[in-house]
Image: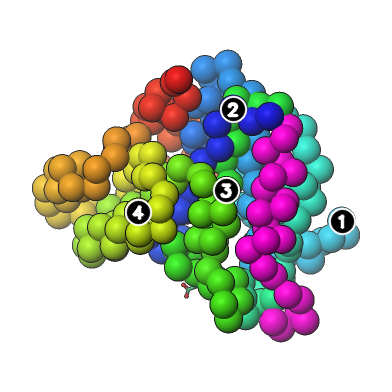
Amino acid sequence: MAKKTYFITGTDTGVGKTIVSAAILEAAKAAGKRTLAMKPIASGCDNTSEGLRNEDALMLQAAITETLPYDTINPIALEPAIAPHVAAHQAGRQISAQRLVGFCRGMQIRPADLLLIEGAGGWRVPLNDRETYAAVPAELKLPVILVVPLKLGCINHAMLSAEAVRADGLTLAGWVANRPEQQVMSCEQDTLDYLTAHLGAPCLGVLPWIEEAETVALPGLLSRYLNITPLIEK
Ligand SMILES: Nc1ncnc2c1ncn2[C@@H]1O[C@H](COP(=O)(O)OP(=O)(O)OP(=O)(O)O)[C@@H](O)[C@H]1O
Ligand SMILES: C[C@H](N)[C@H](N)CCCCCC(=O)O
Ligand SMILES: [Mg+2]
């Protein structure tokens, strides 16, 4: 049984959920922990000879300590890089929160110290006409980690996301500030100060933008800027 499971969300798509997840997994590995990760539904896949493959899922697969088949990490793979409910509709497939919960429970029964489950886009991304992705962590009662890109507008997006997580009855276990580009935003420290004072959860790190590194090296480099103690203690 995975001792700790967290759901990784972000204020938006493309804010760094995957890179932050992989960095957390690298930090946990360095602390001697056994790790697992999932991207239950991925829209945006390459059609390869082995089947549909998503970059996020592959990065998570490379970062975990346990060896898992691709389909276990990413059970629902959809080719177009669009909203998952639209991609599913185009593929003639039904996706439901219950189905995703089943995949997550299947992963949770595996032995590990830490399991990270990466969502898609932000908190209120739809799965279908009735449900949003939030129903999955809500059903599983998972603590949530929020990734916030340090750019103008992120305070509002972060506060709204945290409010929605709590309105759904879940705990914000922590948040990670991620620089989404080389250029540091103006008044970055004021933004961090506001979020630290008002998000009501520990900041697990402020990650720099690292331009030169090979993508494969990024998680390890970024892991040095994280303090994952709040995630693995107890
Ligand atoms: N701190 C950083 N340094 C260098 N590159 C970064 C950093 N943060 C994000 N990136 C790059 O920005 C892109 C978007 O990040 P990422 O894929 O982690 O976002 P995401 O929130 O997981 O997106 P999605 O909603 O598609 O899952 C990726 O190419 C990633 O490598
Ligand atoms: C394709 C992309 N990278 C993500 N996987 C899906 C983002 C869905 C966002 C939907 C929305 O909020 O409008
Ligand atoms: Mg991602």
* Left or right of residue 42: residue 147: left
Single out the mark in the foreground, 3 or 2. Answer: 3
Judged by its main secondary structure, the magenta piece is helix
Mark 4–mark 3 contact, CB under 8 Å? Answer: no
Q: Earlier in the sequence, mark 1 or mark 3?
A: 1
Compared across the picture, whether 64 is left or right of 131 comes to right
Query: In which quadrant will I find the C terminus?
Result: top left
State the residue at coordinates (23%, 63%). Answer: 156
| Magenta-colored stretch includes residue 97 | yes
For label 1, the residue is 50
- Residue 132 visible at all: yes
In the rendering, at what x and y percent does residue 138 appear?
51, 54
Q: How many marks?
A: 4
> In the figure, residue 68 lies in which quadrant?
top right
Q: Earlier in the sequence, mark 2 or mark 4?
A: 2
Q: Amino acid at mark 4?
A: Arg
**Mark positioned earlier in the residue sequence (3 or 2):** 2
In the image, which is nearer the foreground, mark 1 or mark 3?
3
Question: In what element is the residue under mark 1?
Answer: loop
> Residue under circle 4?
166
Q: Residue 131's spot in the image, x, y percent?
A: 56, 72
Give the residue number, with chain letter if any, for mark 3.
140
